Image (tube, rainbow, N blue to C red):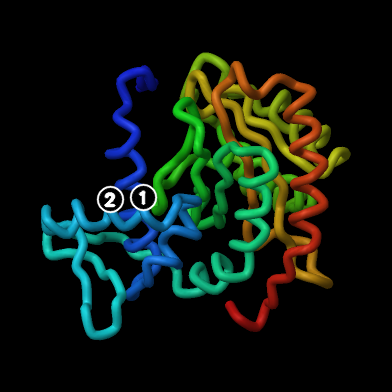
């Protein structure tokens, strides 16, 4: 379902970003860390966190001055252990991209035929597009997933792409031959596009983060935003910058 963002209450939405960051961290976080990873001013983050504390969704250790997940939050299906290290390595680049374009920057990893969102830095715009940390989407309908696929060899790509692909929106590519052509075009330019294929009203561009000396991708980084703010020329500019940025992020195979 596509939501009408005119009715999204921004303070509540931003509060959920802070809660997402705490859930993904799997450990206590300082106010500075939370403000940084959500691109919020510290004073704003403090007020939102204080409200979440009053509601039981966030706890606070006065001795260490760190925030933790509160008793009212149930966390299920934890992220893989190596995801935290990938987040740590990629976050400086994500923050730079968010400052450069002021759209939502996402980080995802492939797992069991899906893309799993492991980090996100939100846009300061009232109108923006973003996923929740821990959310899972199909590889074929997302720019993050396509970016992962374009790094695969021919045999592995054929094995990974399903014979039948479910339509998430009317724009989702479900014809396998057409989808393979799209992956080939994405490989030529080193970035992938989602033209409202996963969610109506939102476009996304992504590039793969690969291990040095190895062909496959361990993660992908993307920029997403509302369709009116993401014309093709903007997506192209973002895609080229994402490809450069992803190439500069070094992920060591040994850490996995």
In the image, what residue occupies the spot 55% across and 53% down? 108
Give coordinates of residue 19: x percent, y percent: 31, 55
The residue under label 1 is 44
Asked if 256 appears above or below 14 in the picture, the reply is below
Is there any visible trace of residue 143 in the rendered image?
A: yes
In the image, what residue occupies the spot 52% across and 39% down? 123
Classify mark 2: residues with Cα within 10 Å, few (<14), some (14-19) or many (20+). some
CB under 8 Å between discs 1 and 2: yes
Give coordinates of residue 163: x percent, y percent: 58, 34
Please, which residue is most extreme toward the front here? 43
Asked if 201 appears above or below 106 in the picture, the reply is above
Question: Helix, strand, or loop for circle 2?
Answer: helix
Give coordinates of residue 85: x percent, y percent: 55, 73
Question: Helix, strand, or loop for circle 1?
Answer: helix
Q: Is residue 229 left or right of residue 216?
A: left
In the image, what residue occupies the spot 39% across and 53% down? 134
Instruction: Work out how far the residue at label 1 is from the one at label 2, CA to CA, in angstroms.
Output: 6 Å
Asked if 206 appears above or below 255 in the picture, the reply is above
Considering the image in quadrants, where does the N terminus appear?
A: top left
In the image shown, does 71 or 162 lie closer to the viewer?
Answer: 71
In the image shown, does 234 or 195 lie closer to the viewer?
Answer: 234
The residue under label 2 is 48
Is there any visible trace of residue 73 in the rendered image?
A: no
Please, which residue is most extreme toward the right here? 188
């Amino acid at each position: 379902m596509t939501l009408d963002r005119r009715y999204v209450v921004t303070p509540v939405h931003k509060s959920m970003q802070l809660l997402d960051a705490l859930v993904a961290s799997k450990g206590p976080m300082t106010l500075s860390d939370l403000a940084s990873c959500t691109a919020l001013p510290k004073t704003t983050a403090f007020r939102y966190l204080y409200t979440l504390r009053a509601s039981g969704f966030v706890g606070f250790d006065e001795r260490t001055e760190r925030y933790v997940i509160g008793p009212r939050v149930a966390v299920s299906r934890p992220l893989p252990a190596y995801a935290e290290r990938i987040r740590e390595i990629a976050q400086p680049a994500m923050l730079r991209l968010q400052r450069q374009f002021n759209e939502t920057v996402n980080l995802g990893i492939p797992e069991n035929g899906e893309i799993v969102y492991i980090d996100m830095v939100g846009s300061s715009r009232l109108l923006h597009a973003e996923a929740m940390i821990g959310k899972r989407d199909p590889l074929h309908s997302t720019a993050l997933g396509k970016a992962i696929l374009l790094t695969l060899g021919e045999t592995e790509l054929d094995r990974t792409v399903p014979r039948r692909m479910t339509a998430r929106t009317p724009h989702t590519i479900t014809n396998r031959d057409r989808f393979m052509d799209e992956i080939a075009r994405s490989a030529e330019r080193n970035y992938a596009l989602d033209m409202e294929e996963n969610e109506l009203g939102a476009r996304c561009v992504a590039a793969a983060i690969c291990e040095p000396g190895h062909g496959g991708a361990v993660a992908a980084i993307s920029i997403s935003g509302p369709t009116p703010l993401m014309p093709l020329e903007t997506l192209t500019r973002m895609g080229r910058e994402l490809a450069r940025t992803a190439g500069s992020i070094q992920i060591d195979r040994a850490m996995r």
